[in-house]
Image: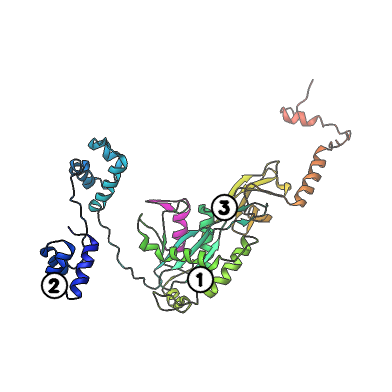
Amino acid sequence: MITLEDWALIRRFAAEGEPHAAIARRLGISRTTVVKAVNSDAPPRYARTPAEGSFAVFEPRVRVLLQEFPDMPATVIAERVGWTGSSSWFRGNVARLRPEHRRVDPADRLTWEAGDAAQCDLWFPPKRILLENGASMLLPVLVMTLAYSRFVLATMIPTKTTEDLLLGMWQLLQQLGRVPRRLLWDNERGIGRGPHRAEGVPAFMGTLATRLVLLRPRDPESKGIVERRNGWFEKSFMPGRSFASPADFNGQLSGWLDRANQKIVRTTKARPIDLLEADRARMLALPPVPPIVGWRNQVRLGRDYYVRIARNDYSVDPTWIGRMVDAHADLERVQVRLDGRLITEHPRVWARGVTITDTSHVATAARLRQEFQQPRTQAGGDGLVRDLADYDRAFGLEGREVS
């Protein structure tokens, strides 16, 4: 086999018109080699003859296992077939064979009808938000994207628990003013997984008269619209911004979304705001009775006149110690009621493990404590004596003569 340099020289001499025999004499090679080099379409390349490796003996048994169990780990396969050689060499060969035995899962191009679906997801902005107690945390943002119009709604929520997820969805649906016929979610723990739904979710969906769809694993096409929006937030909304509080974050995000929903979407070739009314027209109306959402706790108010709700303790008017009270929290406030009557209200704190005290409750507790510690005065005797006729009537002796 000639070298790459000889091949280049042969082709140059031939291009200059030198006869093949003269080229062969000059380079000391055969005329046949010169002819082959001139007629070749590519430079010479060394190709090693493949030799049967140590894996070849095990390959048939490996293929049998992969045919039945395409996701079986390479370490388990090595143990099953009795491999004792290099583990990295075996893993490399298994990785080469595995794609041939995996089942194919084609992805269709989806079309979305007006009013049909909203894709929901959680986005965690890569910046900590300052909370009321001075701590800073990464907080979730609930994102809802209408599949037909590509209109985006989003709001930051305190936690990804079921209570706050339902509060966030209800808040976004109220902003939209309508209810899509389907709400698409991944297997989010606070919403549901597989055939199971988190507590409170079926009642919420039933009140809205909509259908919850929990997507199967490895089905990114059905929720790709909202997931692409999450990446858009990080590249377009987040850079150069700082946030003083969750309320500040939501204010900036709302203003940015007003402008973002007016930009033309490449796939639809239209602005989301222009398609929104057609989308809303095919949706369901909001329910006449709001769904029951939020944090709830019914408890008998103890001497320590606080109720715990949404992981924080809130003071209650101590006048009602010993009575059953109902505490309820939404995204903005905490209310405590007695027999349906509001007796205490606090702004909701998004930090965790915090005690929130109303100074008027402390003053009332001090007054009640002082009254409790003072001894009660007993009324003096008034000299009254029971009529003896009362005893006669009690024992049936009335009207009888006693000797």
Residue 195 in magenta? yes
Exactly how many numbered labels are in the figure?
3
Q: Circle 2 — which element?
A: loop
What residue is shown with label 2?
19
On screen, residue 129 versus residue 83, left or right, reads: right
Q: Nearer the viewer, residue 263 or 185?
A: 263
Which segment did they paint magenta? 192-210
Q: Are marks 1 and 3 in contact (CB under 8 Å)?
A: no
Disc 2 from disc 1: Cα separation: 87 Å
Q: Earlier in the sequence, mark 2 or mark 3?
A: 2
Disc 1 from disc 3: Cα separation: 23 Å
Q: Circle 1 — which element?
A: loop
Q: Circle 3 — which element?
A: strand
On screen, residue 399 versus residue 49, left or right, reads: right
Q: Earlier in the sequence, mark 2 or mark 1?
A: 2
**Image mark for residue 177:** 1
Around disc 1, counting alpha carbons within 10 Å, would you say few (fewer than 14), some (14 to 19), or many (20 or more)?
Answer: few
Residue at the (22%, 71%) spot, across then down: 12
What residue is shown with label 3?
295
Q: Nearer the viewer, residue 161 or 8?
A: 8
Amino acid at dot 3: Trp
Amino acid at dot 1: Gly
